[in-house]
Image: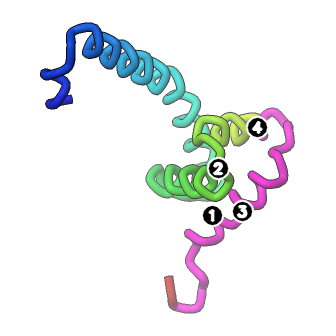
């Protein structure tokens, strides 16, 4: 926002309002993502970072927000099925991070 100094006051105020709203939204969604990371860690014996990478990979491959994927992961703990396209990508993302067992990683 270094170039924002030259903007009129009303525009700067609007930019700050939008940024504040985005930060609030991110803070509200963070716990859901963290819970989903924990579920993935428990289910797939992966690290916290690997769980994040799995969520991001599924997000990129399905054009779905990480938060929505996190909600779907959490829902599976309540016996709710994950949408098939997400399940397919989740399985592929987990498999891509697992050692192959042939000496290559």
Residue nearest the observer in this picture, 27 or 37: 27
Q: How is the image coloured?
A: rainbow
Q: Does the magenta stretch include residue 100?
A: yes
In 3D space, how far apart are the residues under numbered discs 4 and 3 (Cα atoms)? 16 Å
Q: Which residue is labeled 3 in the image?
A: 91
Residue nearest the observer in this picture, 41 or 51: 51
Q: How crowded is mark 4: few (under 14 residues within 10 Å), some or many (20 or more)?
A: few
Image disc number at residue 93 = 1
**Residue 40 shown left or right of residue 16 in the figure:** right
Q: Residues within 10 Å of mark 2 (few under 14, many from 20)?
A: few
The mark nearer the N terminus, 2 or 3, is 2
The mark nearer the N terminus, 1 or 2, is 2
Q: Do the residues labelled 4 and 3 touch (CB within 8 Å)?
A: no
Image disc number at residue 102 = none
Q: What stretch is highlighted in magenta?
A: 76-103
Q: Which residue is labeled 2 in the image?
A: 63
- Above or below 16: residue 92: below
Q: Do the residues labelled 3 and 1 touch (CB within 8 Å)?
A: yes
Residue drawn 68% across and 53% down?
Answer: 62
Q: Residues within 10 Å of mark 1 (few under 14, many from 20)?
A: many
The mark nearer the N terminus, 4 or 3, is 4
């Amino acid at each position: 926002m270094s170039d924002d100094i030259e903007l009129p006051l009303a525009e700067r105020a609007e930019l700050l309002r939008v940024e504040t709203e985005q930060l609030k939204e991110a803070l509200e969604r963070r716990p859901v993502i963290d819970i989903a990371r924990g579920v993935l860690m428990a289910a797939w014996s992966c690290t916290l970072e690997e769980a994040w990478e799995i969520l991001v990979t599924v997000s990129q491959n399905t054009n779905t927000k990480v938060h929505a994927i996190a909600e779907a992961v959490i829902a599976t703990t309540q016996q709710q099925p994950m949408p098939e396209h997400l399940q397919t990508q989740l399985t592929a993302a987990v498999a891509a991070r697992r050692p192959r067992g042939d000496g290559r990683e």
